[in-house]
Image (tube, coloured by chain):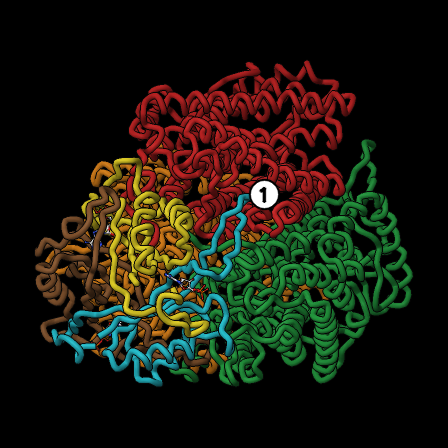
Chain colours: A yellow, B cyan, C brown, D green, E red, F orange
Amino acid sequence: MKLIIAVIQPSKLEEVKAALSEVEVVRLTIMDVQGFGRQKGQTEVYRGREISVNLLRKVQLQIAVNDEFVEPTVSAIIQGGRTGDSGQIGDGKIFVLPLDDCIRIRTGERGPEAI
Amino acid sequence: MKLIIAVIQPSKLEEVKAALSEVEVVRLTIMDVQGFGRQKGQTEVYRGREISVNLLRKVQLQIAVNDEFVEPTVSAIIQGGRTGDSGQIGDGKIFVLPLDDCIRIRTGERGPEAI
Amino acid sequence: MKLIIAVIQPSKLEEVKAALSEVEVVRLTIMDVQGFGRQKGQTEVYRGREISVNLLRKVQLQIAVNDEFVEPTVSAIIQGGRTGDSGQIGDGKIFVLPLDDCIRIRTGERGPEAI
Amino acid sequence: MLCTLQKQGWLMLLMATCLSLTATTALPNVTFAQEEEAAAEEAPAEEAAEEAAEEEAEPIDYADLRWEMGWTINTLVMFICAVLVIFMQAGFAMLEVGLNTSKNTVNILFKNVMDLSVGVLLYLFVGWGIMYSGTDSPYFGYDGPWVSRDAQMADDGSWEAAPNDADGSPYASSGADFLFQVAFAATAATIVSGAVAGRMQFKAYLVYSAVLTGLIYPISGFWKWGGGFLDQQGFQDFAGSVVVHAVGGFAGLAGAIVLGPRLGRYVNGKSVPIPGHNIAFAALGVFILWVGWYGFNPGSQLTYDGFVNAEATTYIALTTTISAAAGAVAAMVFAWVLFGKPDVTMALNGALAGLVAITANCDRVSQPESLIIGLIGGVLVVIGIMLLDKMQIDDPVGAWPVHGLCGVWGGLATGIFGDLPDGIESQGDFFFVQLKATVIICVWAFVTMFILFAVLKAAGILRVSEAEEQQGLDISEHGMQAYGG
Amino acid sequence: MLCTLQKQGWLMLLMATCLSLTATTALPNVTFAQEEEAAAEEAPAEEAAEEAAEEEAEPIDYADLRWEMGWTINTLVMFICAVLVIFMQAGFAMLEVGLNTSKNTVNILFKNVMDLSVGVLLYLFVGWGIMYSGTDSPYFGYDGPWVSRDAQMADDGSWEAAPNDADGSPYASSGADFLFQVAFAATAATIVSGAVAGRMQFKAYLVYSAVLTGLIYPISGFWKWGGGFLDQQGFQDFAGSVVVHAVGGFAGLAGAIVLGPRLGRYVNGKSVPIPGHNIAFAALGVFILWVGWYGFNPGSQLTYDGFVNAEATTYIALTTTISAAAGAVAAMVFAWVLFGKPDVTMALNGALAGLVAITANCDRVSQPESLIIGLIGGVLVVIGIMLLDKMQIDDPVGAWPVHGLCGVWGGLATGIFGDLPDGIESQGDFFFVQLKATVIICVWAFVTMFILFAVLKAAGILRVSEAEEQQGLDISEHGMQAYGG
Amino acid sequence: MLCTLQKQGWLMLLMATCLSLTATTALPNVTFAQEEEAAAEEAPAEEAAEEAAEEEAEPIDYADLRWEMGWTINTLVMFICAVLVIFMQAGFAMLEVGLNTSKNTVNILFKNVMDLSVGVLLYLFVGWGIMYSGTDSPYFGYDGPWVSRDAQMADDGSWEAAPNDADGSPYASSGADFLFQVAFAATAATIVSGAVAGRMQFKAYLVYSAVLTGLIYPISGFWKWGGGFLDQQGFQDFAGSVVVHAVGGFAGLAGAIVLGPRLGRYVNGKSVPIPGHNIAFAALGVFILWVGWYGFNPGSQLTYDGFVNAEATTYIALTTTISAAAGAVAAMVFAWVLFGKPDVTMALNGALAGLVAITANCDRVSQPESLIIGLIGGVLVVIGIMLLDKMQIDDPVGAWPVHGLCGVWGGLATGIFGDLPDGIESQGDFFFVQLKATVIICVWAFVTMFILFAVLKAAGILRVSEAEEQQGLDISEHGMQAYGG
Ligand SMILES: Nc1ncnc2c1ncn2[C@@H]1O[C@H](COP(=O)(O)OP(=O)(O)O)[C@@H](O)[C@H]1O
Ligand SMILES: Nc1ncnc2c1ncn2[C@@H]1O[C@H](COP(=O)(O)OP(=O)(O)O)[C@@H](O)[C@H]1O
Ligand SMILES: Nc1ncnc2c1ncn2[C@@H]1O[C@H](COP(=O)(O)OP(=O)(O)O)[C@@H](O)[C@H]1O
């Protein structure tokens, strides 16, 4: 099992969700994050003082999947999250982490079938 | 060492925290997330347009524990987070990730004793 | 590759970011979290009722790095995040998780060079 | 018509409104006539006591400049005060939203918007006609919908409708009067929305709101302000500590009891506070309410023209201000001593407590008395909140402690400190009159509303399901979240 | 001067303001004289119809107490109403902020602040002089910047400037008048900011705002309220359903069309709603607007003194209230039936719809009629929102459905229900007059603004880049986030 | 009594209030008498200059209709203006909350609520009696607590207390007057809360607030508005650019200096901005303040009846509006040019700057002059903010640049542009008088407050601990978070 963490453009969320449900990945956890990547952030000015905010609003998806679902999930995210065909700086990243175990609180089921 | 990530009902937070402190798990990090699981989300209507929001408010707990604490922690979360005895869709999930290292910023201590 | 998760004092964010960029770690994801650690939280009173909120505002950093960057990153965070020289309870923690893979959405590159 | 209203709620409402369109607007004039007669008949009975009645006997010289200027000023100032009171709706909305969890925000806002909107229509069609029916009955009357026009001049310069007058003194236009009164009705209604927040079905709330503004509030309102039996007994409630706030507060209490507490509010006997989600909104709400109260109390002077009335209007504003300030300070200090920390929500409730408590007597107490009334109100509200908590009654915003308890306090304080009204001999008698009337009105509001809520509960449309409540009413009832990207 | 304004926008603006300082303040007096003449010349033509004109013939006895008190009351009440209307700016700001995404909050707030600030200056220098130029031309005139003073007394007690009067009845000071009028101009301007939210360059908006308040609004305003050709044809628009709201609404529509929808609002033909980020702000905004409307409509009575005027002022407040309530209820019920859930944003828009629709006719419809007007307005706004969505025009806050569509409805409703004005024989004629004038004004606003936005687009300064839009205007345009730690 | 207040703060406060209840309400009448005398004695000295004084000599015919209507209008309008000024408290609260971090929200709100509440009580018991003591001393006097009543009629129709009058012209009731004045006092107090936000102990703030509203503000207020030495020297400050705003601004500056900057605001010499957490609140606050200012400035006309007064009232509103708009535009443009982006917080401060700057002279400058005053104010506020930043003084909301610096500018602008008051010969003299008085008042406020804050610091109750500050005052001082689920 893997835990897939993806950081995407907020405006792409709907499309990514759509792409995911096509590969039958219907369960995920989402949170608002701030991103700081190669993408040039603006330098904000507050009261005449510069604040360097390369921090941009992003959305993070956390998706626990069984191994066979990793590739479909990744490509679904890429497909849904890329701006245009060539993509654009700021489109984000996907991280794949090993997942030792998964428990469903409701039933107490463990492992793959709990995902 | 493991990093336990749990997604629970916001309304269950207090109970889960209580259950955890009983097994002497007193340190954790919490964040607001939005969940998208088997639980049927409502389809919202905004200005007469449907928006399918299976997204529901959830709370995510991140708890780094030493291996011997994994089971007690997991069962504490289940105990505190389950709705009623039978549980209910939406109660959430627990993910257990391997944790290579842990550092306490204050002291620089590393590994298990830093947890 | 590793995913470094650090929980720090909100007021230290700027310093940590500065310290990180010195070791050429310029990409990270940040989110607001609430911390619950050894640091004594206040017991709040709402309408004459106690609410035990050891929950304190913290900031969480997620940084995916290649292995050789782990140590520099960790020490940069410690350096920037510690209060005073001796540090102070509440300064936070750093967790290092194994990272199986990393994909850049824009290009589809995978692995180390995508970080 | 209204029992059906109880059953099918808002759908009826709209139909009712449309049907009523057929009602001839001539009605009000008839009405007007009625009032004249009524007054006339009463006159002999009261001659001795009221010179007012006498004056009315003499024909009024509308050409008199003093009269016209007085009428103009009264009408315009009452209009401005009505606007301030209507603004209070925004204050209640912000206060209630701020003191509840974010997942019920849309629902609370919606309820407040509807309290005003449904309130205006119901009061227009039913409430106003009941509360100021001009009937001889000391208990109930109704003289039809719509607001009569006055000061309508025919082309020949004669009056089609004469300017409105009260006991022969220049009064104000019926339009101003209605606006001012309907704002009070909406206030009474909206108080409840805070007490039942987070678990009541929206449909049920609309029914409640219609019934309160259309029936319950106007009836007890008539007993006092319409000249009903409480008024005849000498009961004094200048701007409605009891008639408006206690009614709202006890209706809210009934709702909170019948509904039961929110999920997780009391877990196996232990009280688990559910803090509000935006204290800034709550504070903004209180500031707005404080401002609006300058329409509520001074506006209730009703005639503002001339040295004495104008002075009274501002003196009322003064006692109101002192009591509000005292309430805030007292609540802060008291809570600080009790809980070890200054709690802003207590101070905010304290200010409101002071405002509610002074509302009945702002015209007839001295400045030191207004200070005492406010201080006690501020302490009472803290006690009231703890009391409810002990009894495990879940009133999320403290509607009962603020409006119910301090409304009662205001009513009684009038009897304790207030100057004696005509016809009452001793302070003791006065206090007793106040006590009796206050109890009657609170019981009226509590019992009738308890029944209504019980009926809705029996009908199974009172409370939302556990799942819906956990999810929050915003999504379950309105399919919408209050906050987003 | 203004075409340059169009080109270089705000920088010009400041210079213009400074330059204008040289303009002698004597001008207004000349003006005043002009008006007198104008009036005089018109007088003979209308003798029969208006006694008003006659009275003006007779010299006014300013020593007369009735006159002085009337003038005082009119001036002060108009001032208070102006304050209420200015308060509406806060309402618009909160409403628009609440119904948009958080990443554009700073931008929207900034636009609203500037609508008022730039609006005041432009209207002072240009708009006011155009709208009330007192010219004989039925189409256009200008008599310079600044506001004339009146009621200036020389040391010998003679008048340096006589108190302002309208048709020989006590009127109000020019200062009060200007404040009231400029608040209307700013309202017209700020309506658009909601329709173009989330994608328009700030610079371009400033240019738009300057042009609308300085030129477009005052010109059509003159046609009606300045005594221009529409007024002469008997067109009635009491407080500006058409003159103010429809102008703003159609200007907004033009902007929304020329700009095109926000990114992701319509993906391959499918409509993807972009919900607002703070419904509490939106509701607060509507409450504030509702309150402000009591300055907007009753204030438009302009003279409030005496039985008849005072009564009319409050009657107007009454019909306004009824229509607002009806609009909110109708929109709620209609949307509920259509979409299965009660949508608070619809109810809020419904209340505004009722307010906009009654604005043109609040003085000349009966209470049942005001109810019908509001109910229909509430239904129309829902339909309008769906209509725009079908046509894939992206109007984030529903500015056109509320102000444009219901503004038109208000104009037409005046012809359908309104009492006939002098000189118009049949309801049919009246309706036709209203229809014609409403169309003319809407076309005027739509076309001129369409051209302006098209020019700005051609100049490439209309819309922000994709990247900037995705990032949000707060950061891309202002380098600032609205919300933070 | 007040020194103890300084030491034990709020606990004393409550006791004090209770004790004072013993004070007989007869006192005020004595007072009234005093004033009469005072006036009488001064009369001969000034006969030539003021006819006013003369008129006072003649007995007033209270039966005169003109008199009664004037008094009525003055009283009611002053009351309405007082309500607008009190509303400003909500504006300050929102502005300060918005421009600070969320972790200090509850604390700021609480301080604002207490500024009003504590302010009302302290001003009632101490401040009012000092500021309008009617003493002969040009420096200080006190004539007891409570507000005297007037226009009290005995049953025989004779006056128990005569209607209040100013120099023989119809004035307003003392109640209206007190409300208006106390709102000013609370404004002065609340200005500081923004400057010291985020690091001051709540207890210490309460002490400060009590001392300012009870002692410091009323004393300097007396020097001008109470007829003290500055007034006698011909110093002009119509509505308090200096007397109210500069006092608050410099008190705030003292606080900011003694407290030192917030943690992390200046790290090793580098300025690290701490952006506000909710710009929408800040903008709402400014809109509310703008609206409230229409009570602040026009209300300061004090008598509004008759052609000349009514016109002046609205002319004041006009200059106020022009200056506010100019300030916003100038600040926006100036900051835009300097920093390359239009910064809304600057525009908001600019609007306030314009309002503050015109406050002293809104009655005696021409429209073009009001424009210039606003423009310069808008530029000054930006410079002031940068200046403080350079000096590493941490004033989170810019209280000093807005109220202190522009308050001074307003005071001086009066001398530069303002029409000469009676008894001053040349503009040069006038400017010098203004300069001197402005300096005196600013120094008075700065020094006394500096001492107070220093004392509190010495007592170790001024600033919270590092840990508490880092955690935020909401939790450390009030055990509560402003925002939650
Ligand atoms: N190494 C990293 N660790 C954590 N988050 C990252 C990392 N790299 C990128 N991100 C996240 O992804 C977002 C988009 O990254 P982006 O700027 O597109 O990177 P790139 O320029 O490599 O495509 C960033 O804002 C950040 O939130
Ligand atoms: N595979 C998953 N990956 C990430 N988050 C998940 C996953 N499954 C469940 N969750 C989180 O847990 C929450 C509750 O899940 P739930 O609906 O109870 O799942 P189930 O129906 O399997 O019990 C979801 O809202 C989501 O936030
Ligand atoms: N075991 C843990 N699991 C998850 N988060 C932790 C853990 N320990 C600490 N944290 C996070 O780090 C923050 C600071 O911890 P801190 O109180 O400094 O711990 P310590 O007292 O051990 O230094 C906590 O508020 C919490 O958010």
Between B48 and E431, the one lying in front of the other is B48
Residue D218 position in % (x across, y down): 75, 63
- Name above or below for residue F75 compared with residue F305: below
Residue F213 in view: no
- Name above or below for residue D410 compared with residue D164: below
Q: Residue at x 23, y 44 (%)?
A: C108
Determine the quadrant in which ligand 3 lies. bottom left
Residue A81 in view: yes
Q: Quadrant of residue F322?
A: top left
Badge 1 residue CB within 8 Å of ligand 2: no
Q: Quadrant of residue F9?
A: bottom left
Q: Secondary structure at mark 1?
A: helix
Residue F181 position in % (x across, y down): 45, 60
In the drawing, does residue E314 fall left or right of residue F12? Answer: right
Residue that carries the numbered disc 1 in the rendered image: E352
Between A32 and C17, the one lying in front of the other is A32
Q: Residue at x 21, y 55 (%)?
A: C101
Residue E194 position in % (x across, y down): 46, 39
- Name above or below for residue E237 compared with residue C64: above
In the drawing, does residue D244 fall left or right of residue E119? Answer: right
Image quarter of the C terminus of chain B: bottom left
> Label 1 marks which chain's residue?
E
**Is disc 1 surrounded by few (<14), some (14 to 19) or many (20+) residues within 10 Å?**
many
Q: Residue at x 48, y 43 (%)?
A: E273
Amino acid at the residue labelled 1: Leu
In the drawing, does residue F332 fall left or right of residue E48? Answer: left
Q: How many marks?
A: 1
Identify the residue at the far front of this view.
A68
Q: Residue at x 72, y 78 (%)?
A: D439
Between F402 and E31, the one lying in front of the other is F402
Residue D53 position in % (x across, y down): 83, 61
Image quarter of the N terminus of chain B: bottom left
